[in-house]
Image (cartoon, helix red, strand yellow):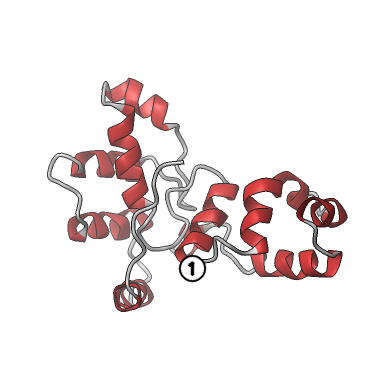
Amino acid sequence: RPNIPARHSPEEEEKRQFMFDSLVADTSLQEFLLDQVRLSELSKDQRPLAEMIIGNLDDYGYLKTTLEELAFATSLPLDQLTQVLTVIQSFHPPGVGARDLRECLMLQLERAGRQKTIEYRMVREHMEALGKRRLPEIARALGQNVDEIQNAANRIGLLEPRPGRAF
């Protein structure tokens, strides 16, 4: 996993949330993300890469191609694309730019500073079992009782599996 950028201060996060909440309904996810590119710390050289990655997101905000495929198609170094994707994954809505559901949920938990929680470990280490609702198996693996695992699963259920849905 690429390095996660430093978490934003509560004030910055509040401003970003306000910007997100005050969006007009007819803004597309791509337009919203491109606006954030313009406001981001991305360099002039990185911005076209960000635009290309954003152009490859589906309506739910998931990256629908691999970075390897983009690197091959553009002859750009994979590490440059990875750096730019990491910045995009720090944008609103939380979870955008994920390559799969597991990464999407992890990004949202990381954004909320919840890396040390049971739910984070469940998503990171037991996503398949979670998807099949094999809670006793997860409880055994994590040394927790089933009720705690059920409560954590309920909290995971409050996350947004499709970050782009609002658009």
In the displayed structure image, the side of residue 45 where residue 143 appears, left or right: right
Q: In this view, does 49 lie above or below 123?
A: above
What secondary structure is marked by label 1? loop
User: How far across and down, in percent of the image, does residue 96 sit?
Assistant: 44, 54
Residue at (42% x, 63% y) in the render: 93
Task: Assess disc 1: are there few (<14), some (14-19) or many (≥20) residues with their C-alpha within 10 Å of its C-alpha.
Answer: few
Q: Quadrant of residue 85?
A: top left
Question: Farthest left residue?
Answer: 44
Q: Is residue 4 above or below residue 18?
A: above
Q: Quadrant of residue 157?
A: bottom right
Residue at (83% x, 69% y) in the render: 147
Q: In this view, does 86 lie above or below 152?
A: above
Residue type marked 1:
Ala
Q: In which quarter of the image is residue 63?
A: top left
User: How far across and down, in percent of the image, does residue 145 sit?
Assistant: 84, 65
User: How far across and down, in percent of the image, does residue 47 sit?
Assistant: 19, 44
Residue sitting nearer the eye, 55 or 42? 42
Residue at (54% x, 60% y) in the render: 115
Residue at (32% x, 32% y) in the render: 79
Q: Name the residue under label 1.
A: 112
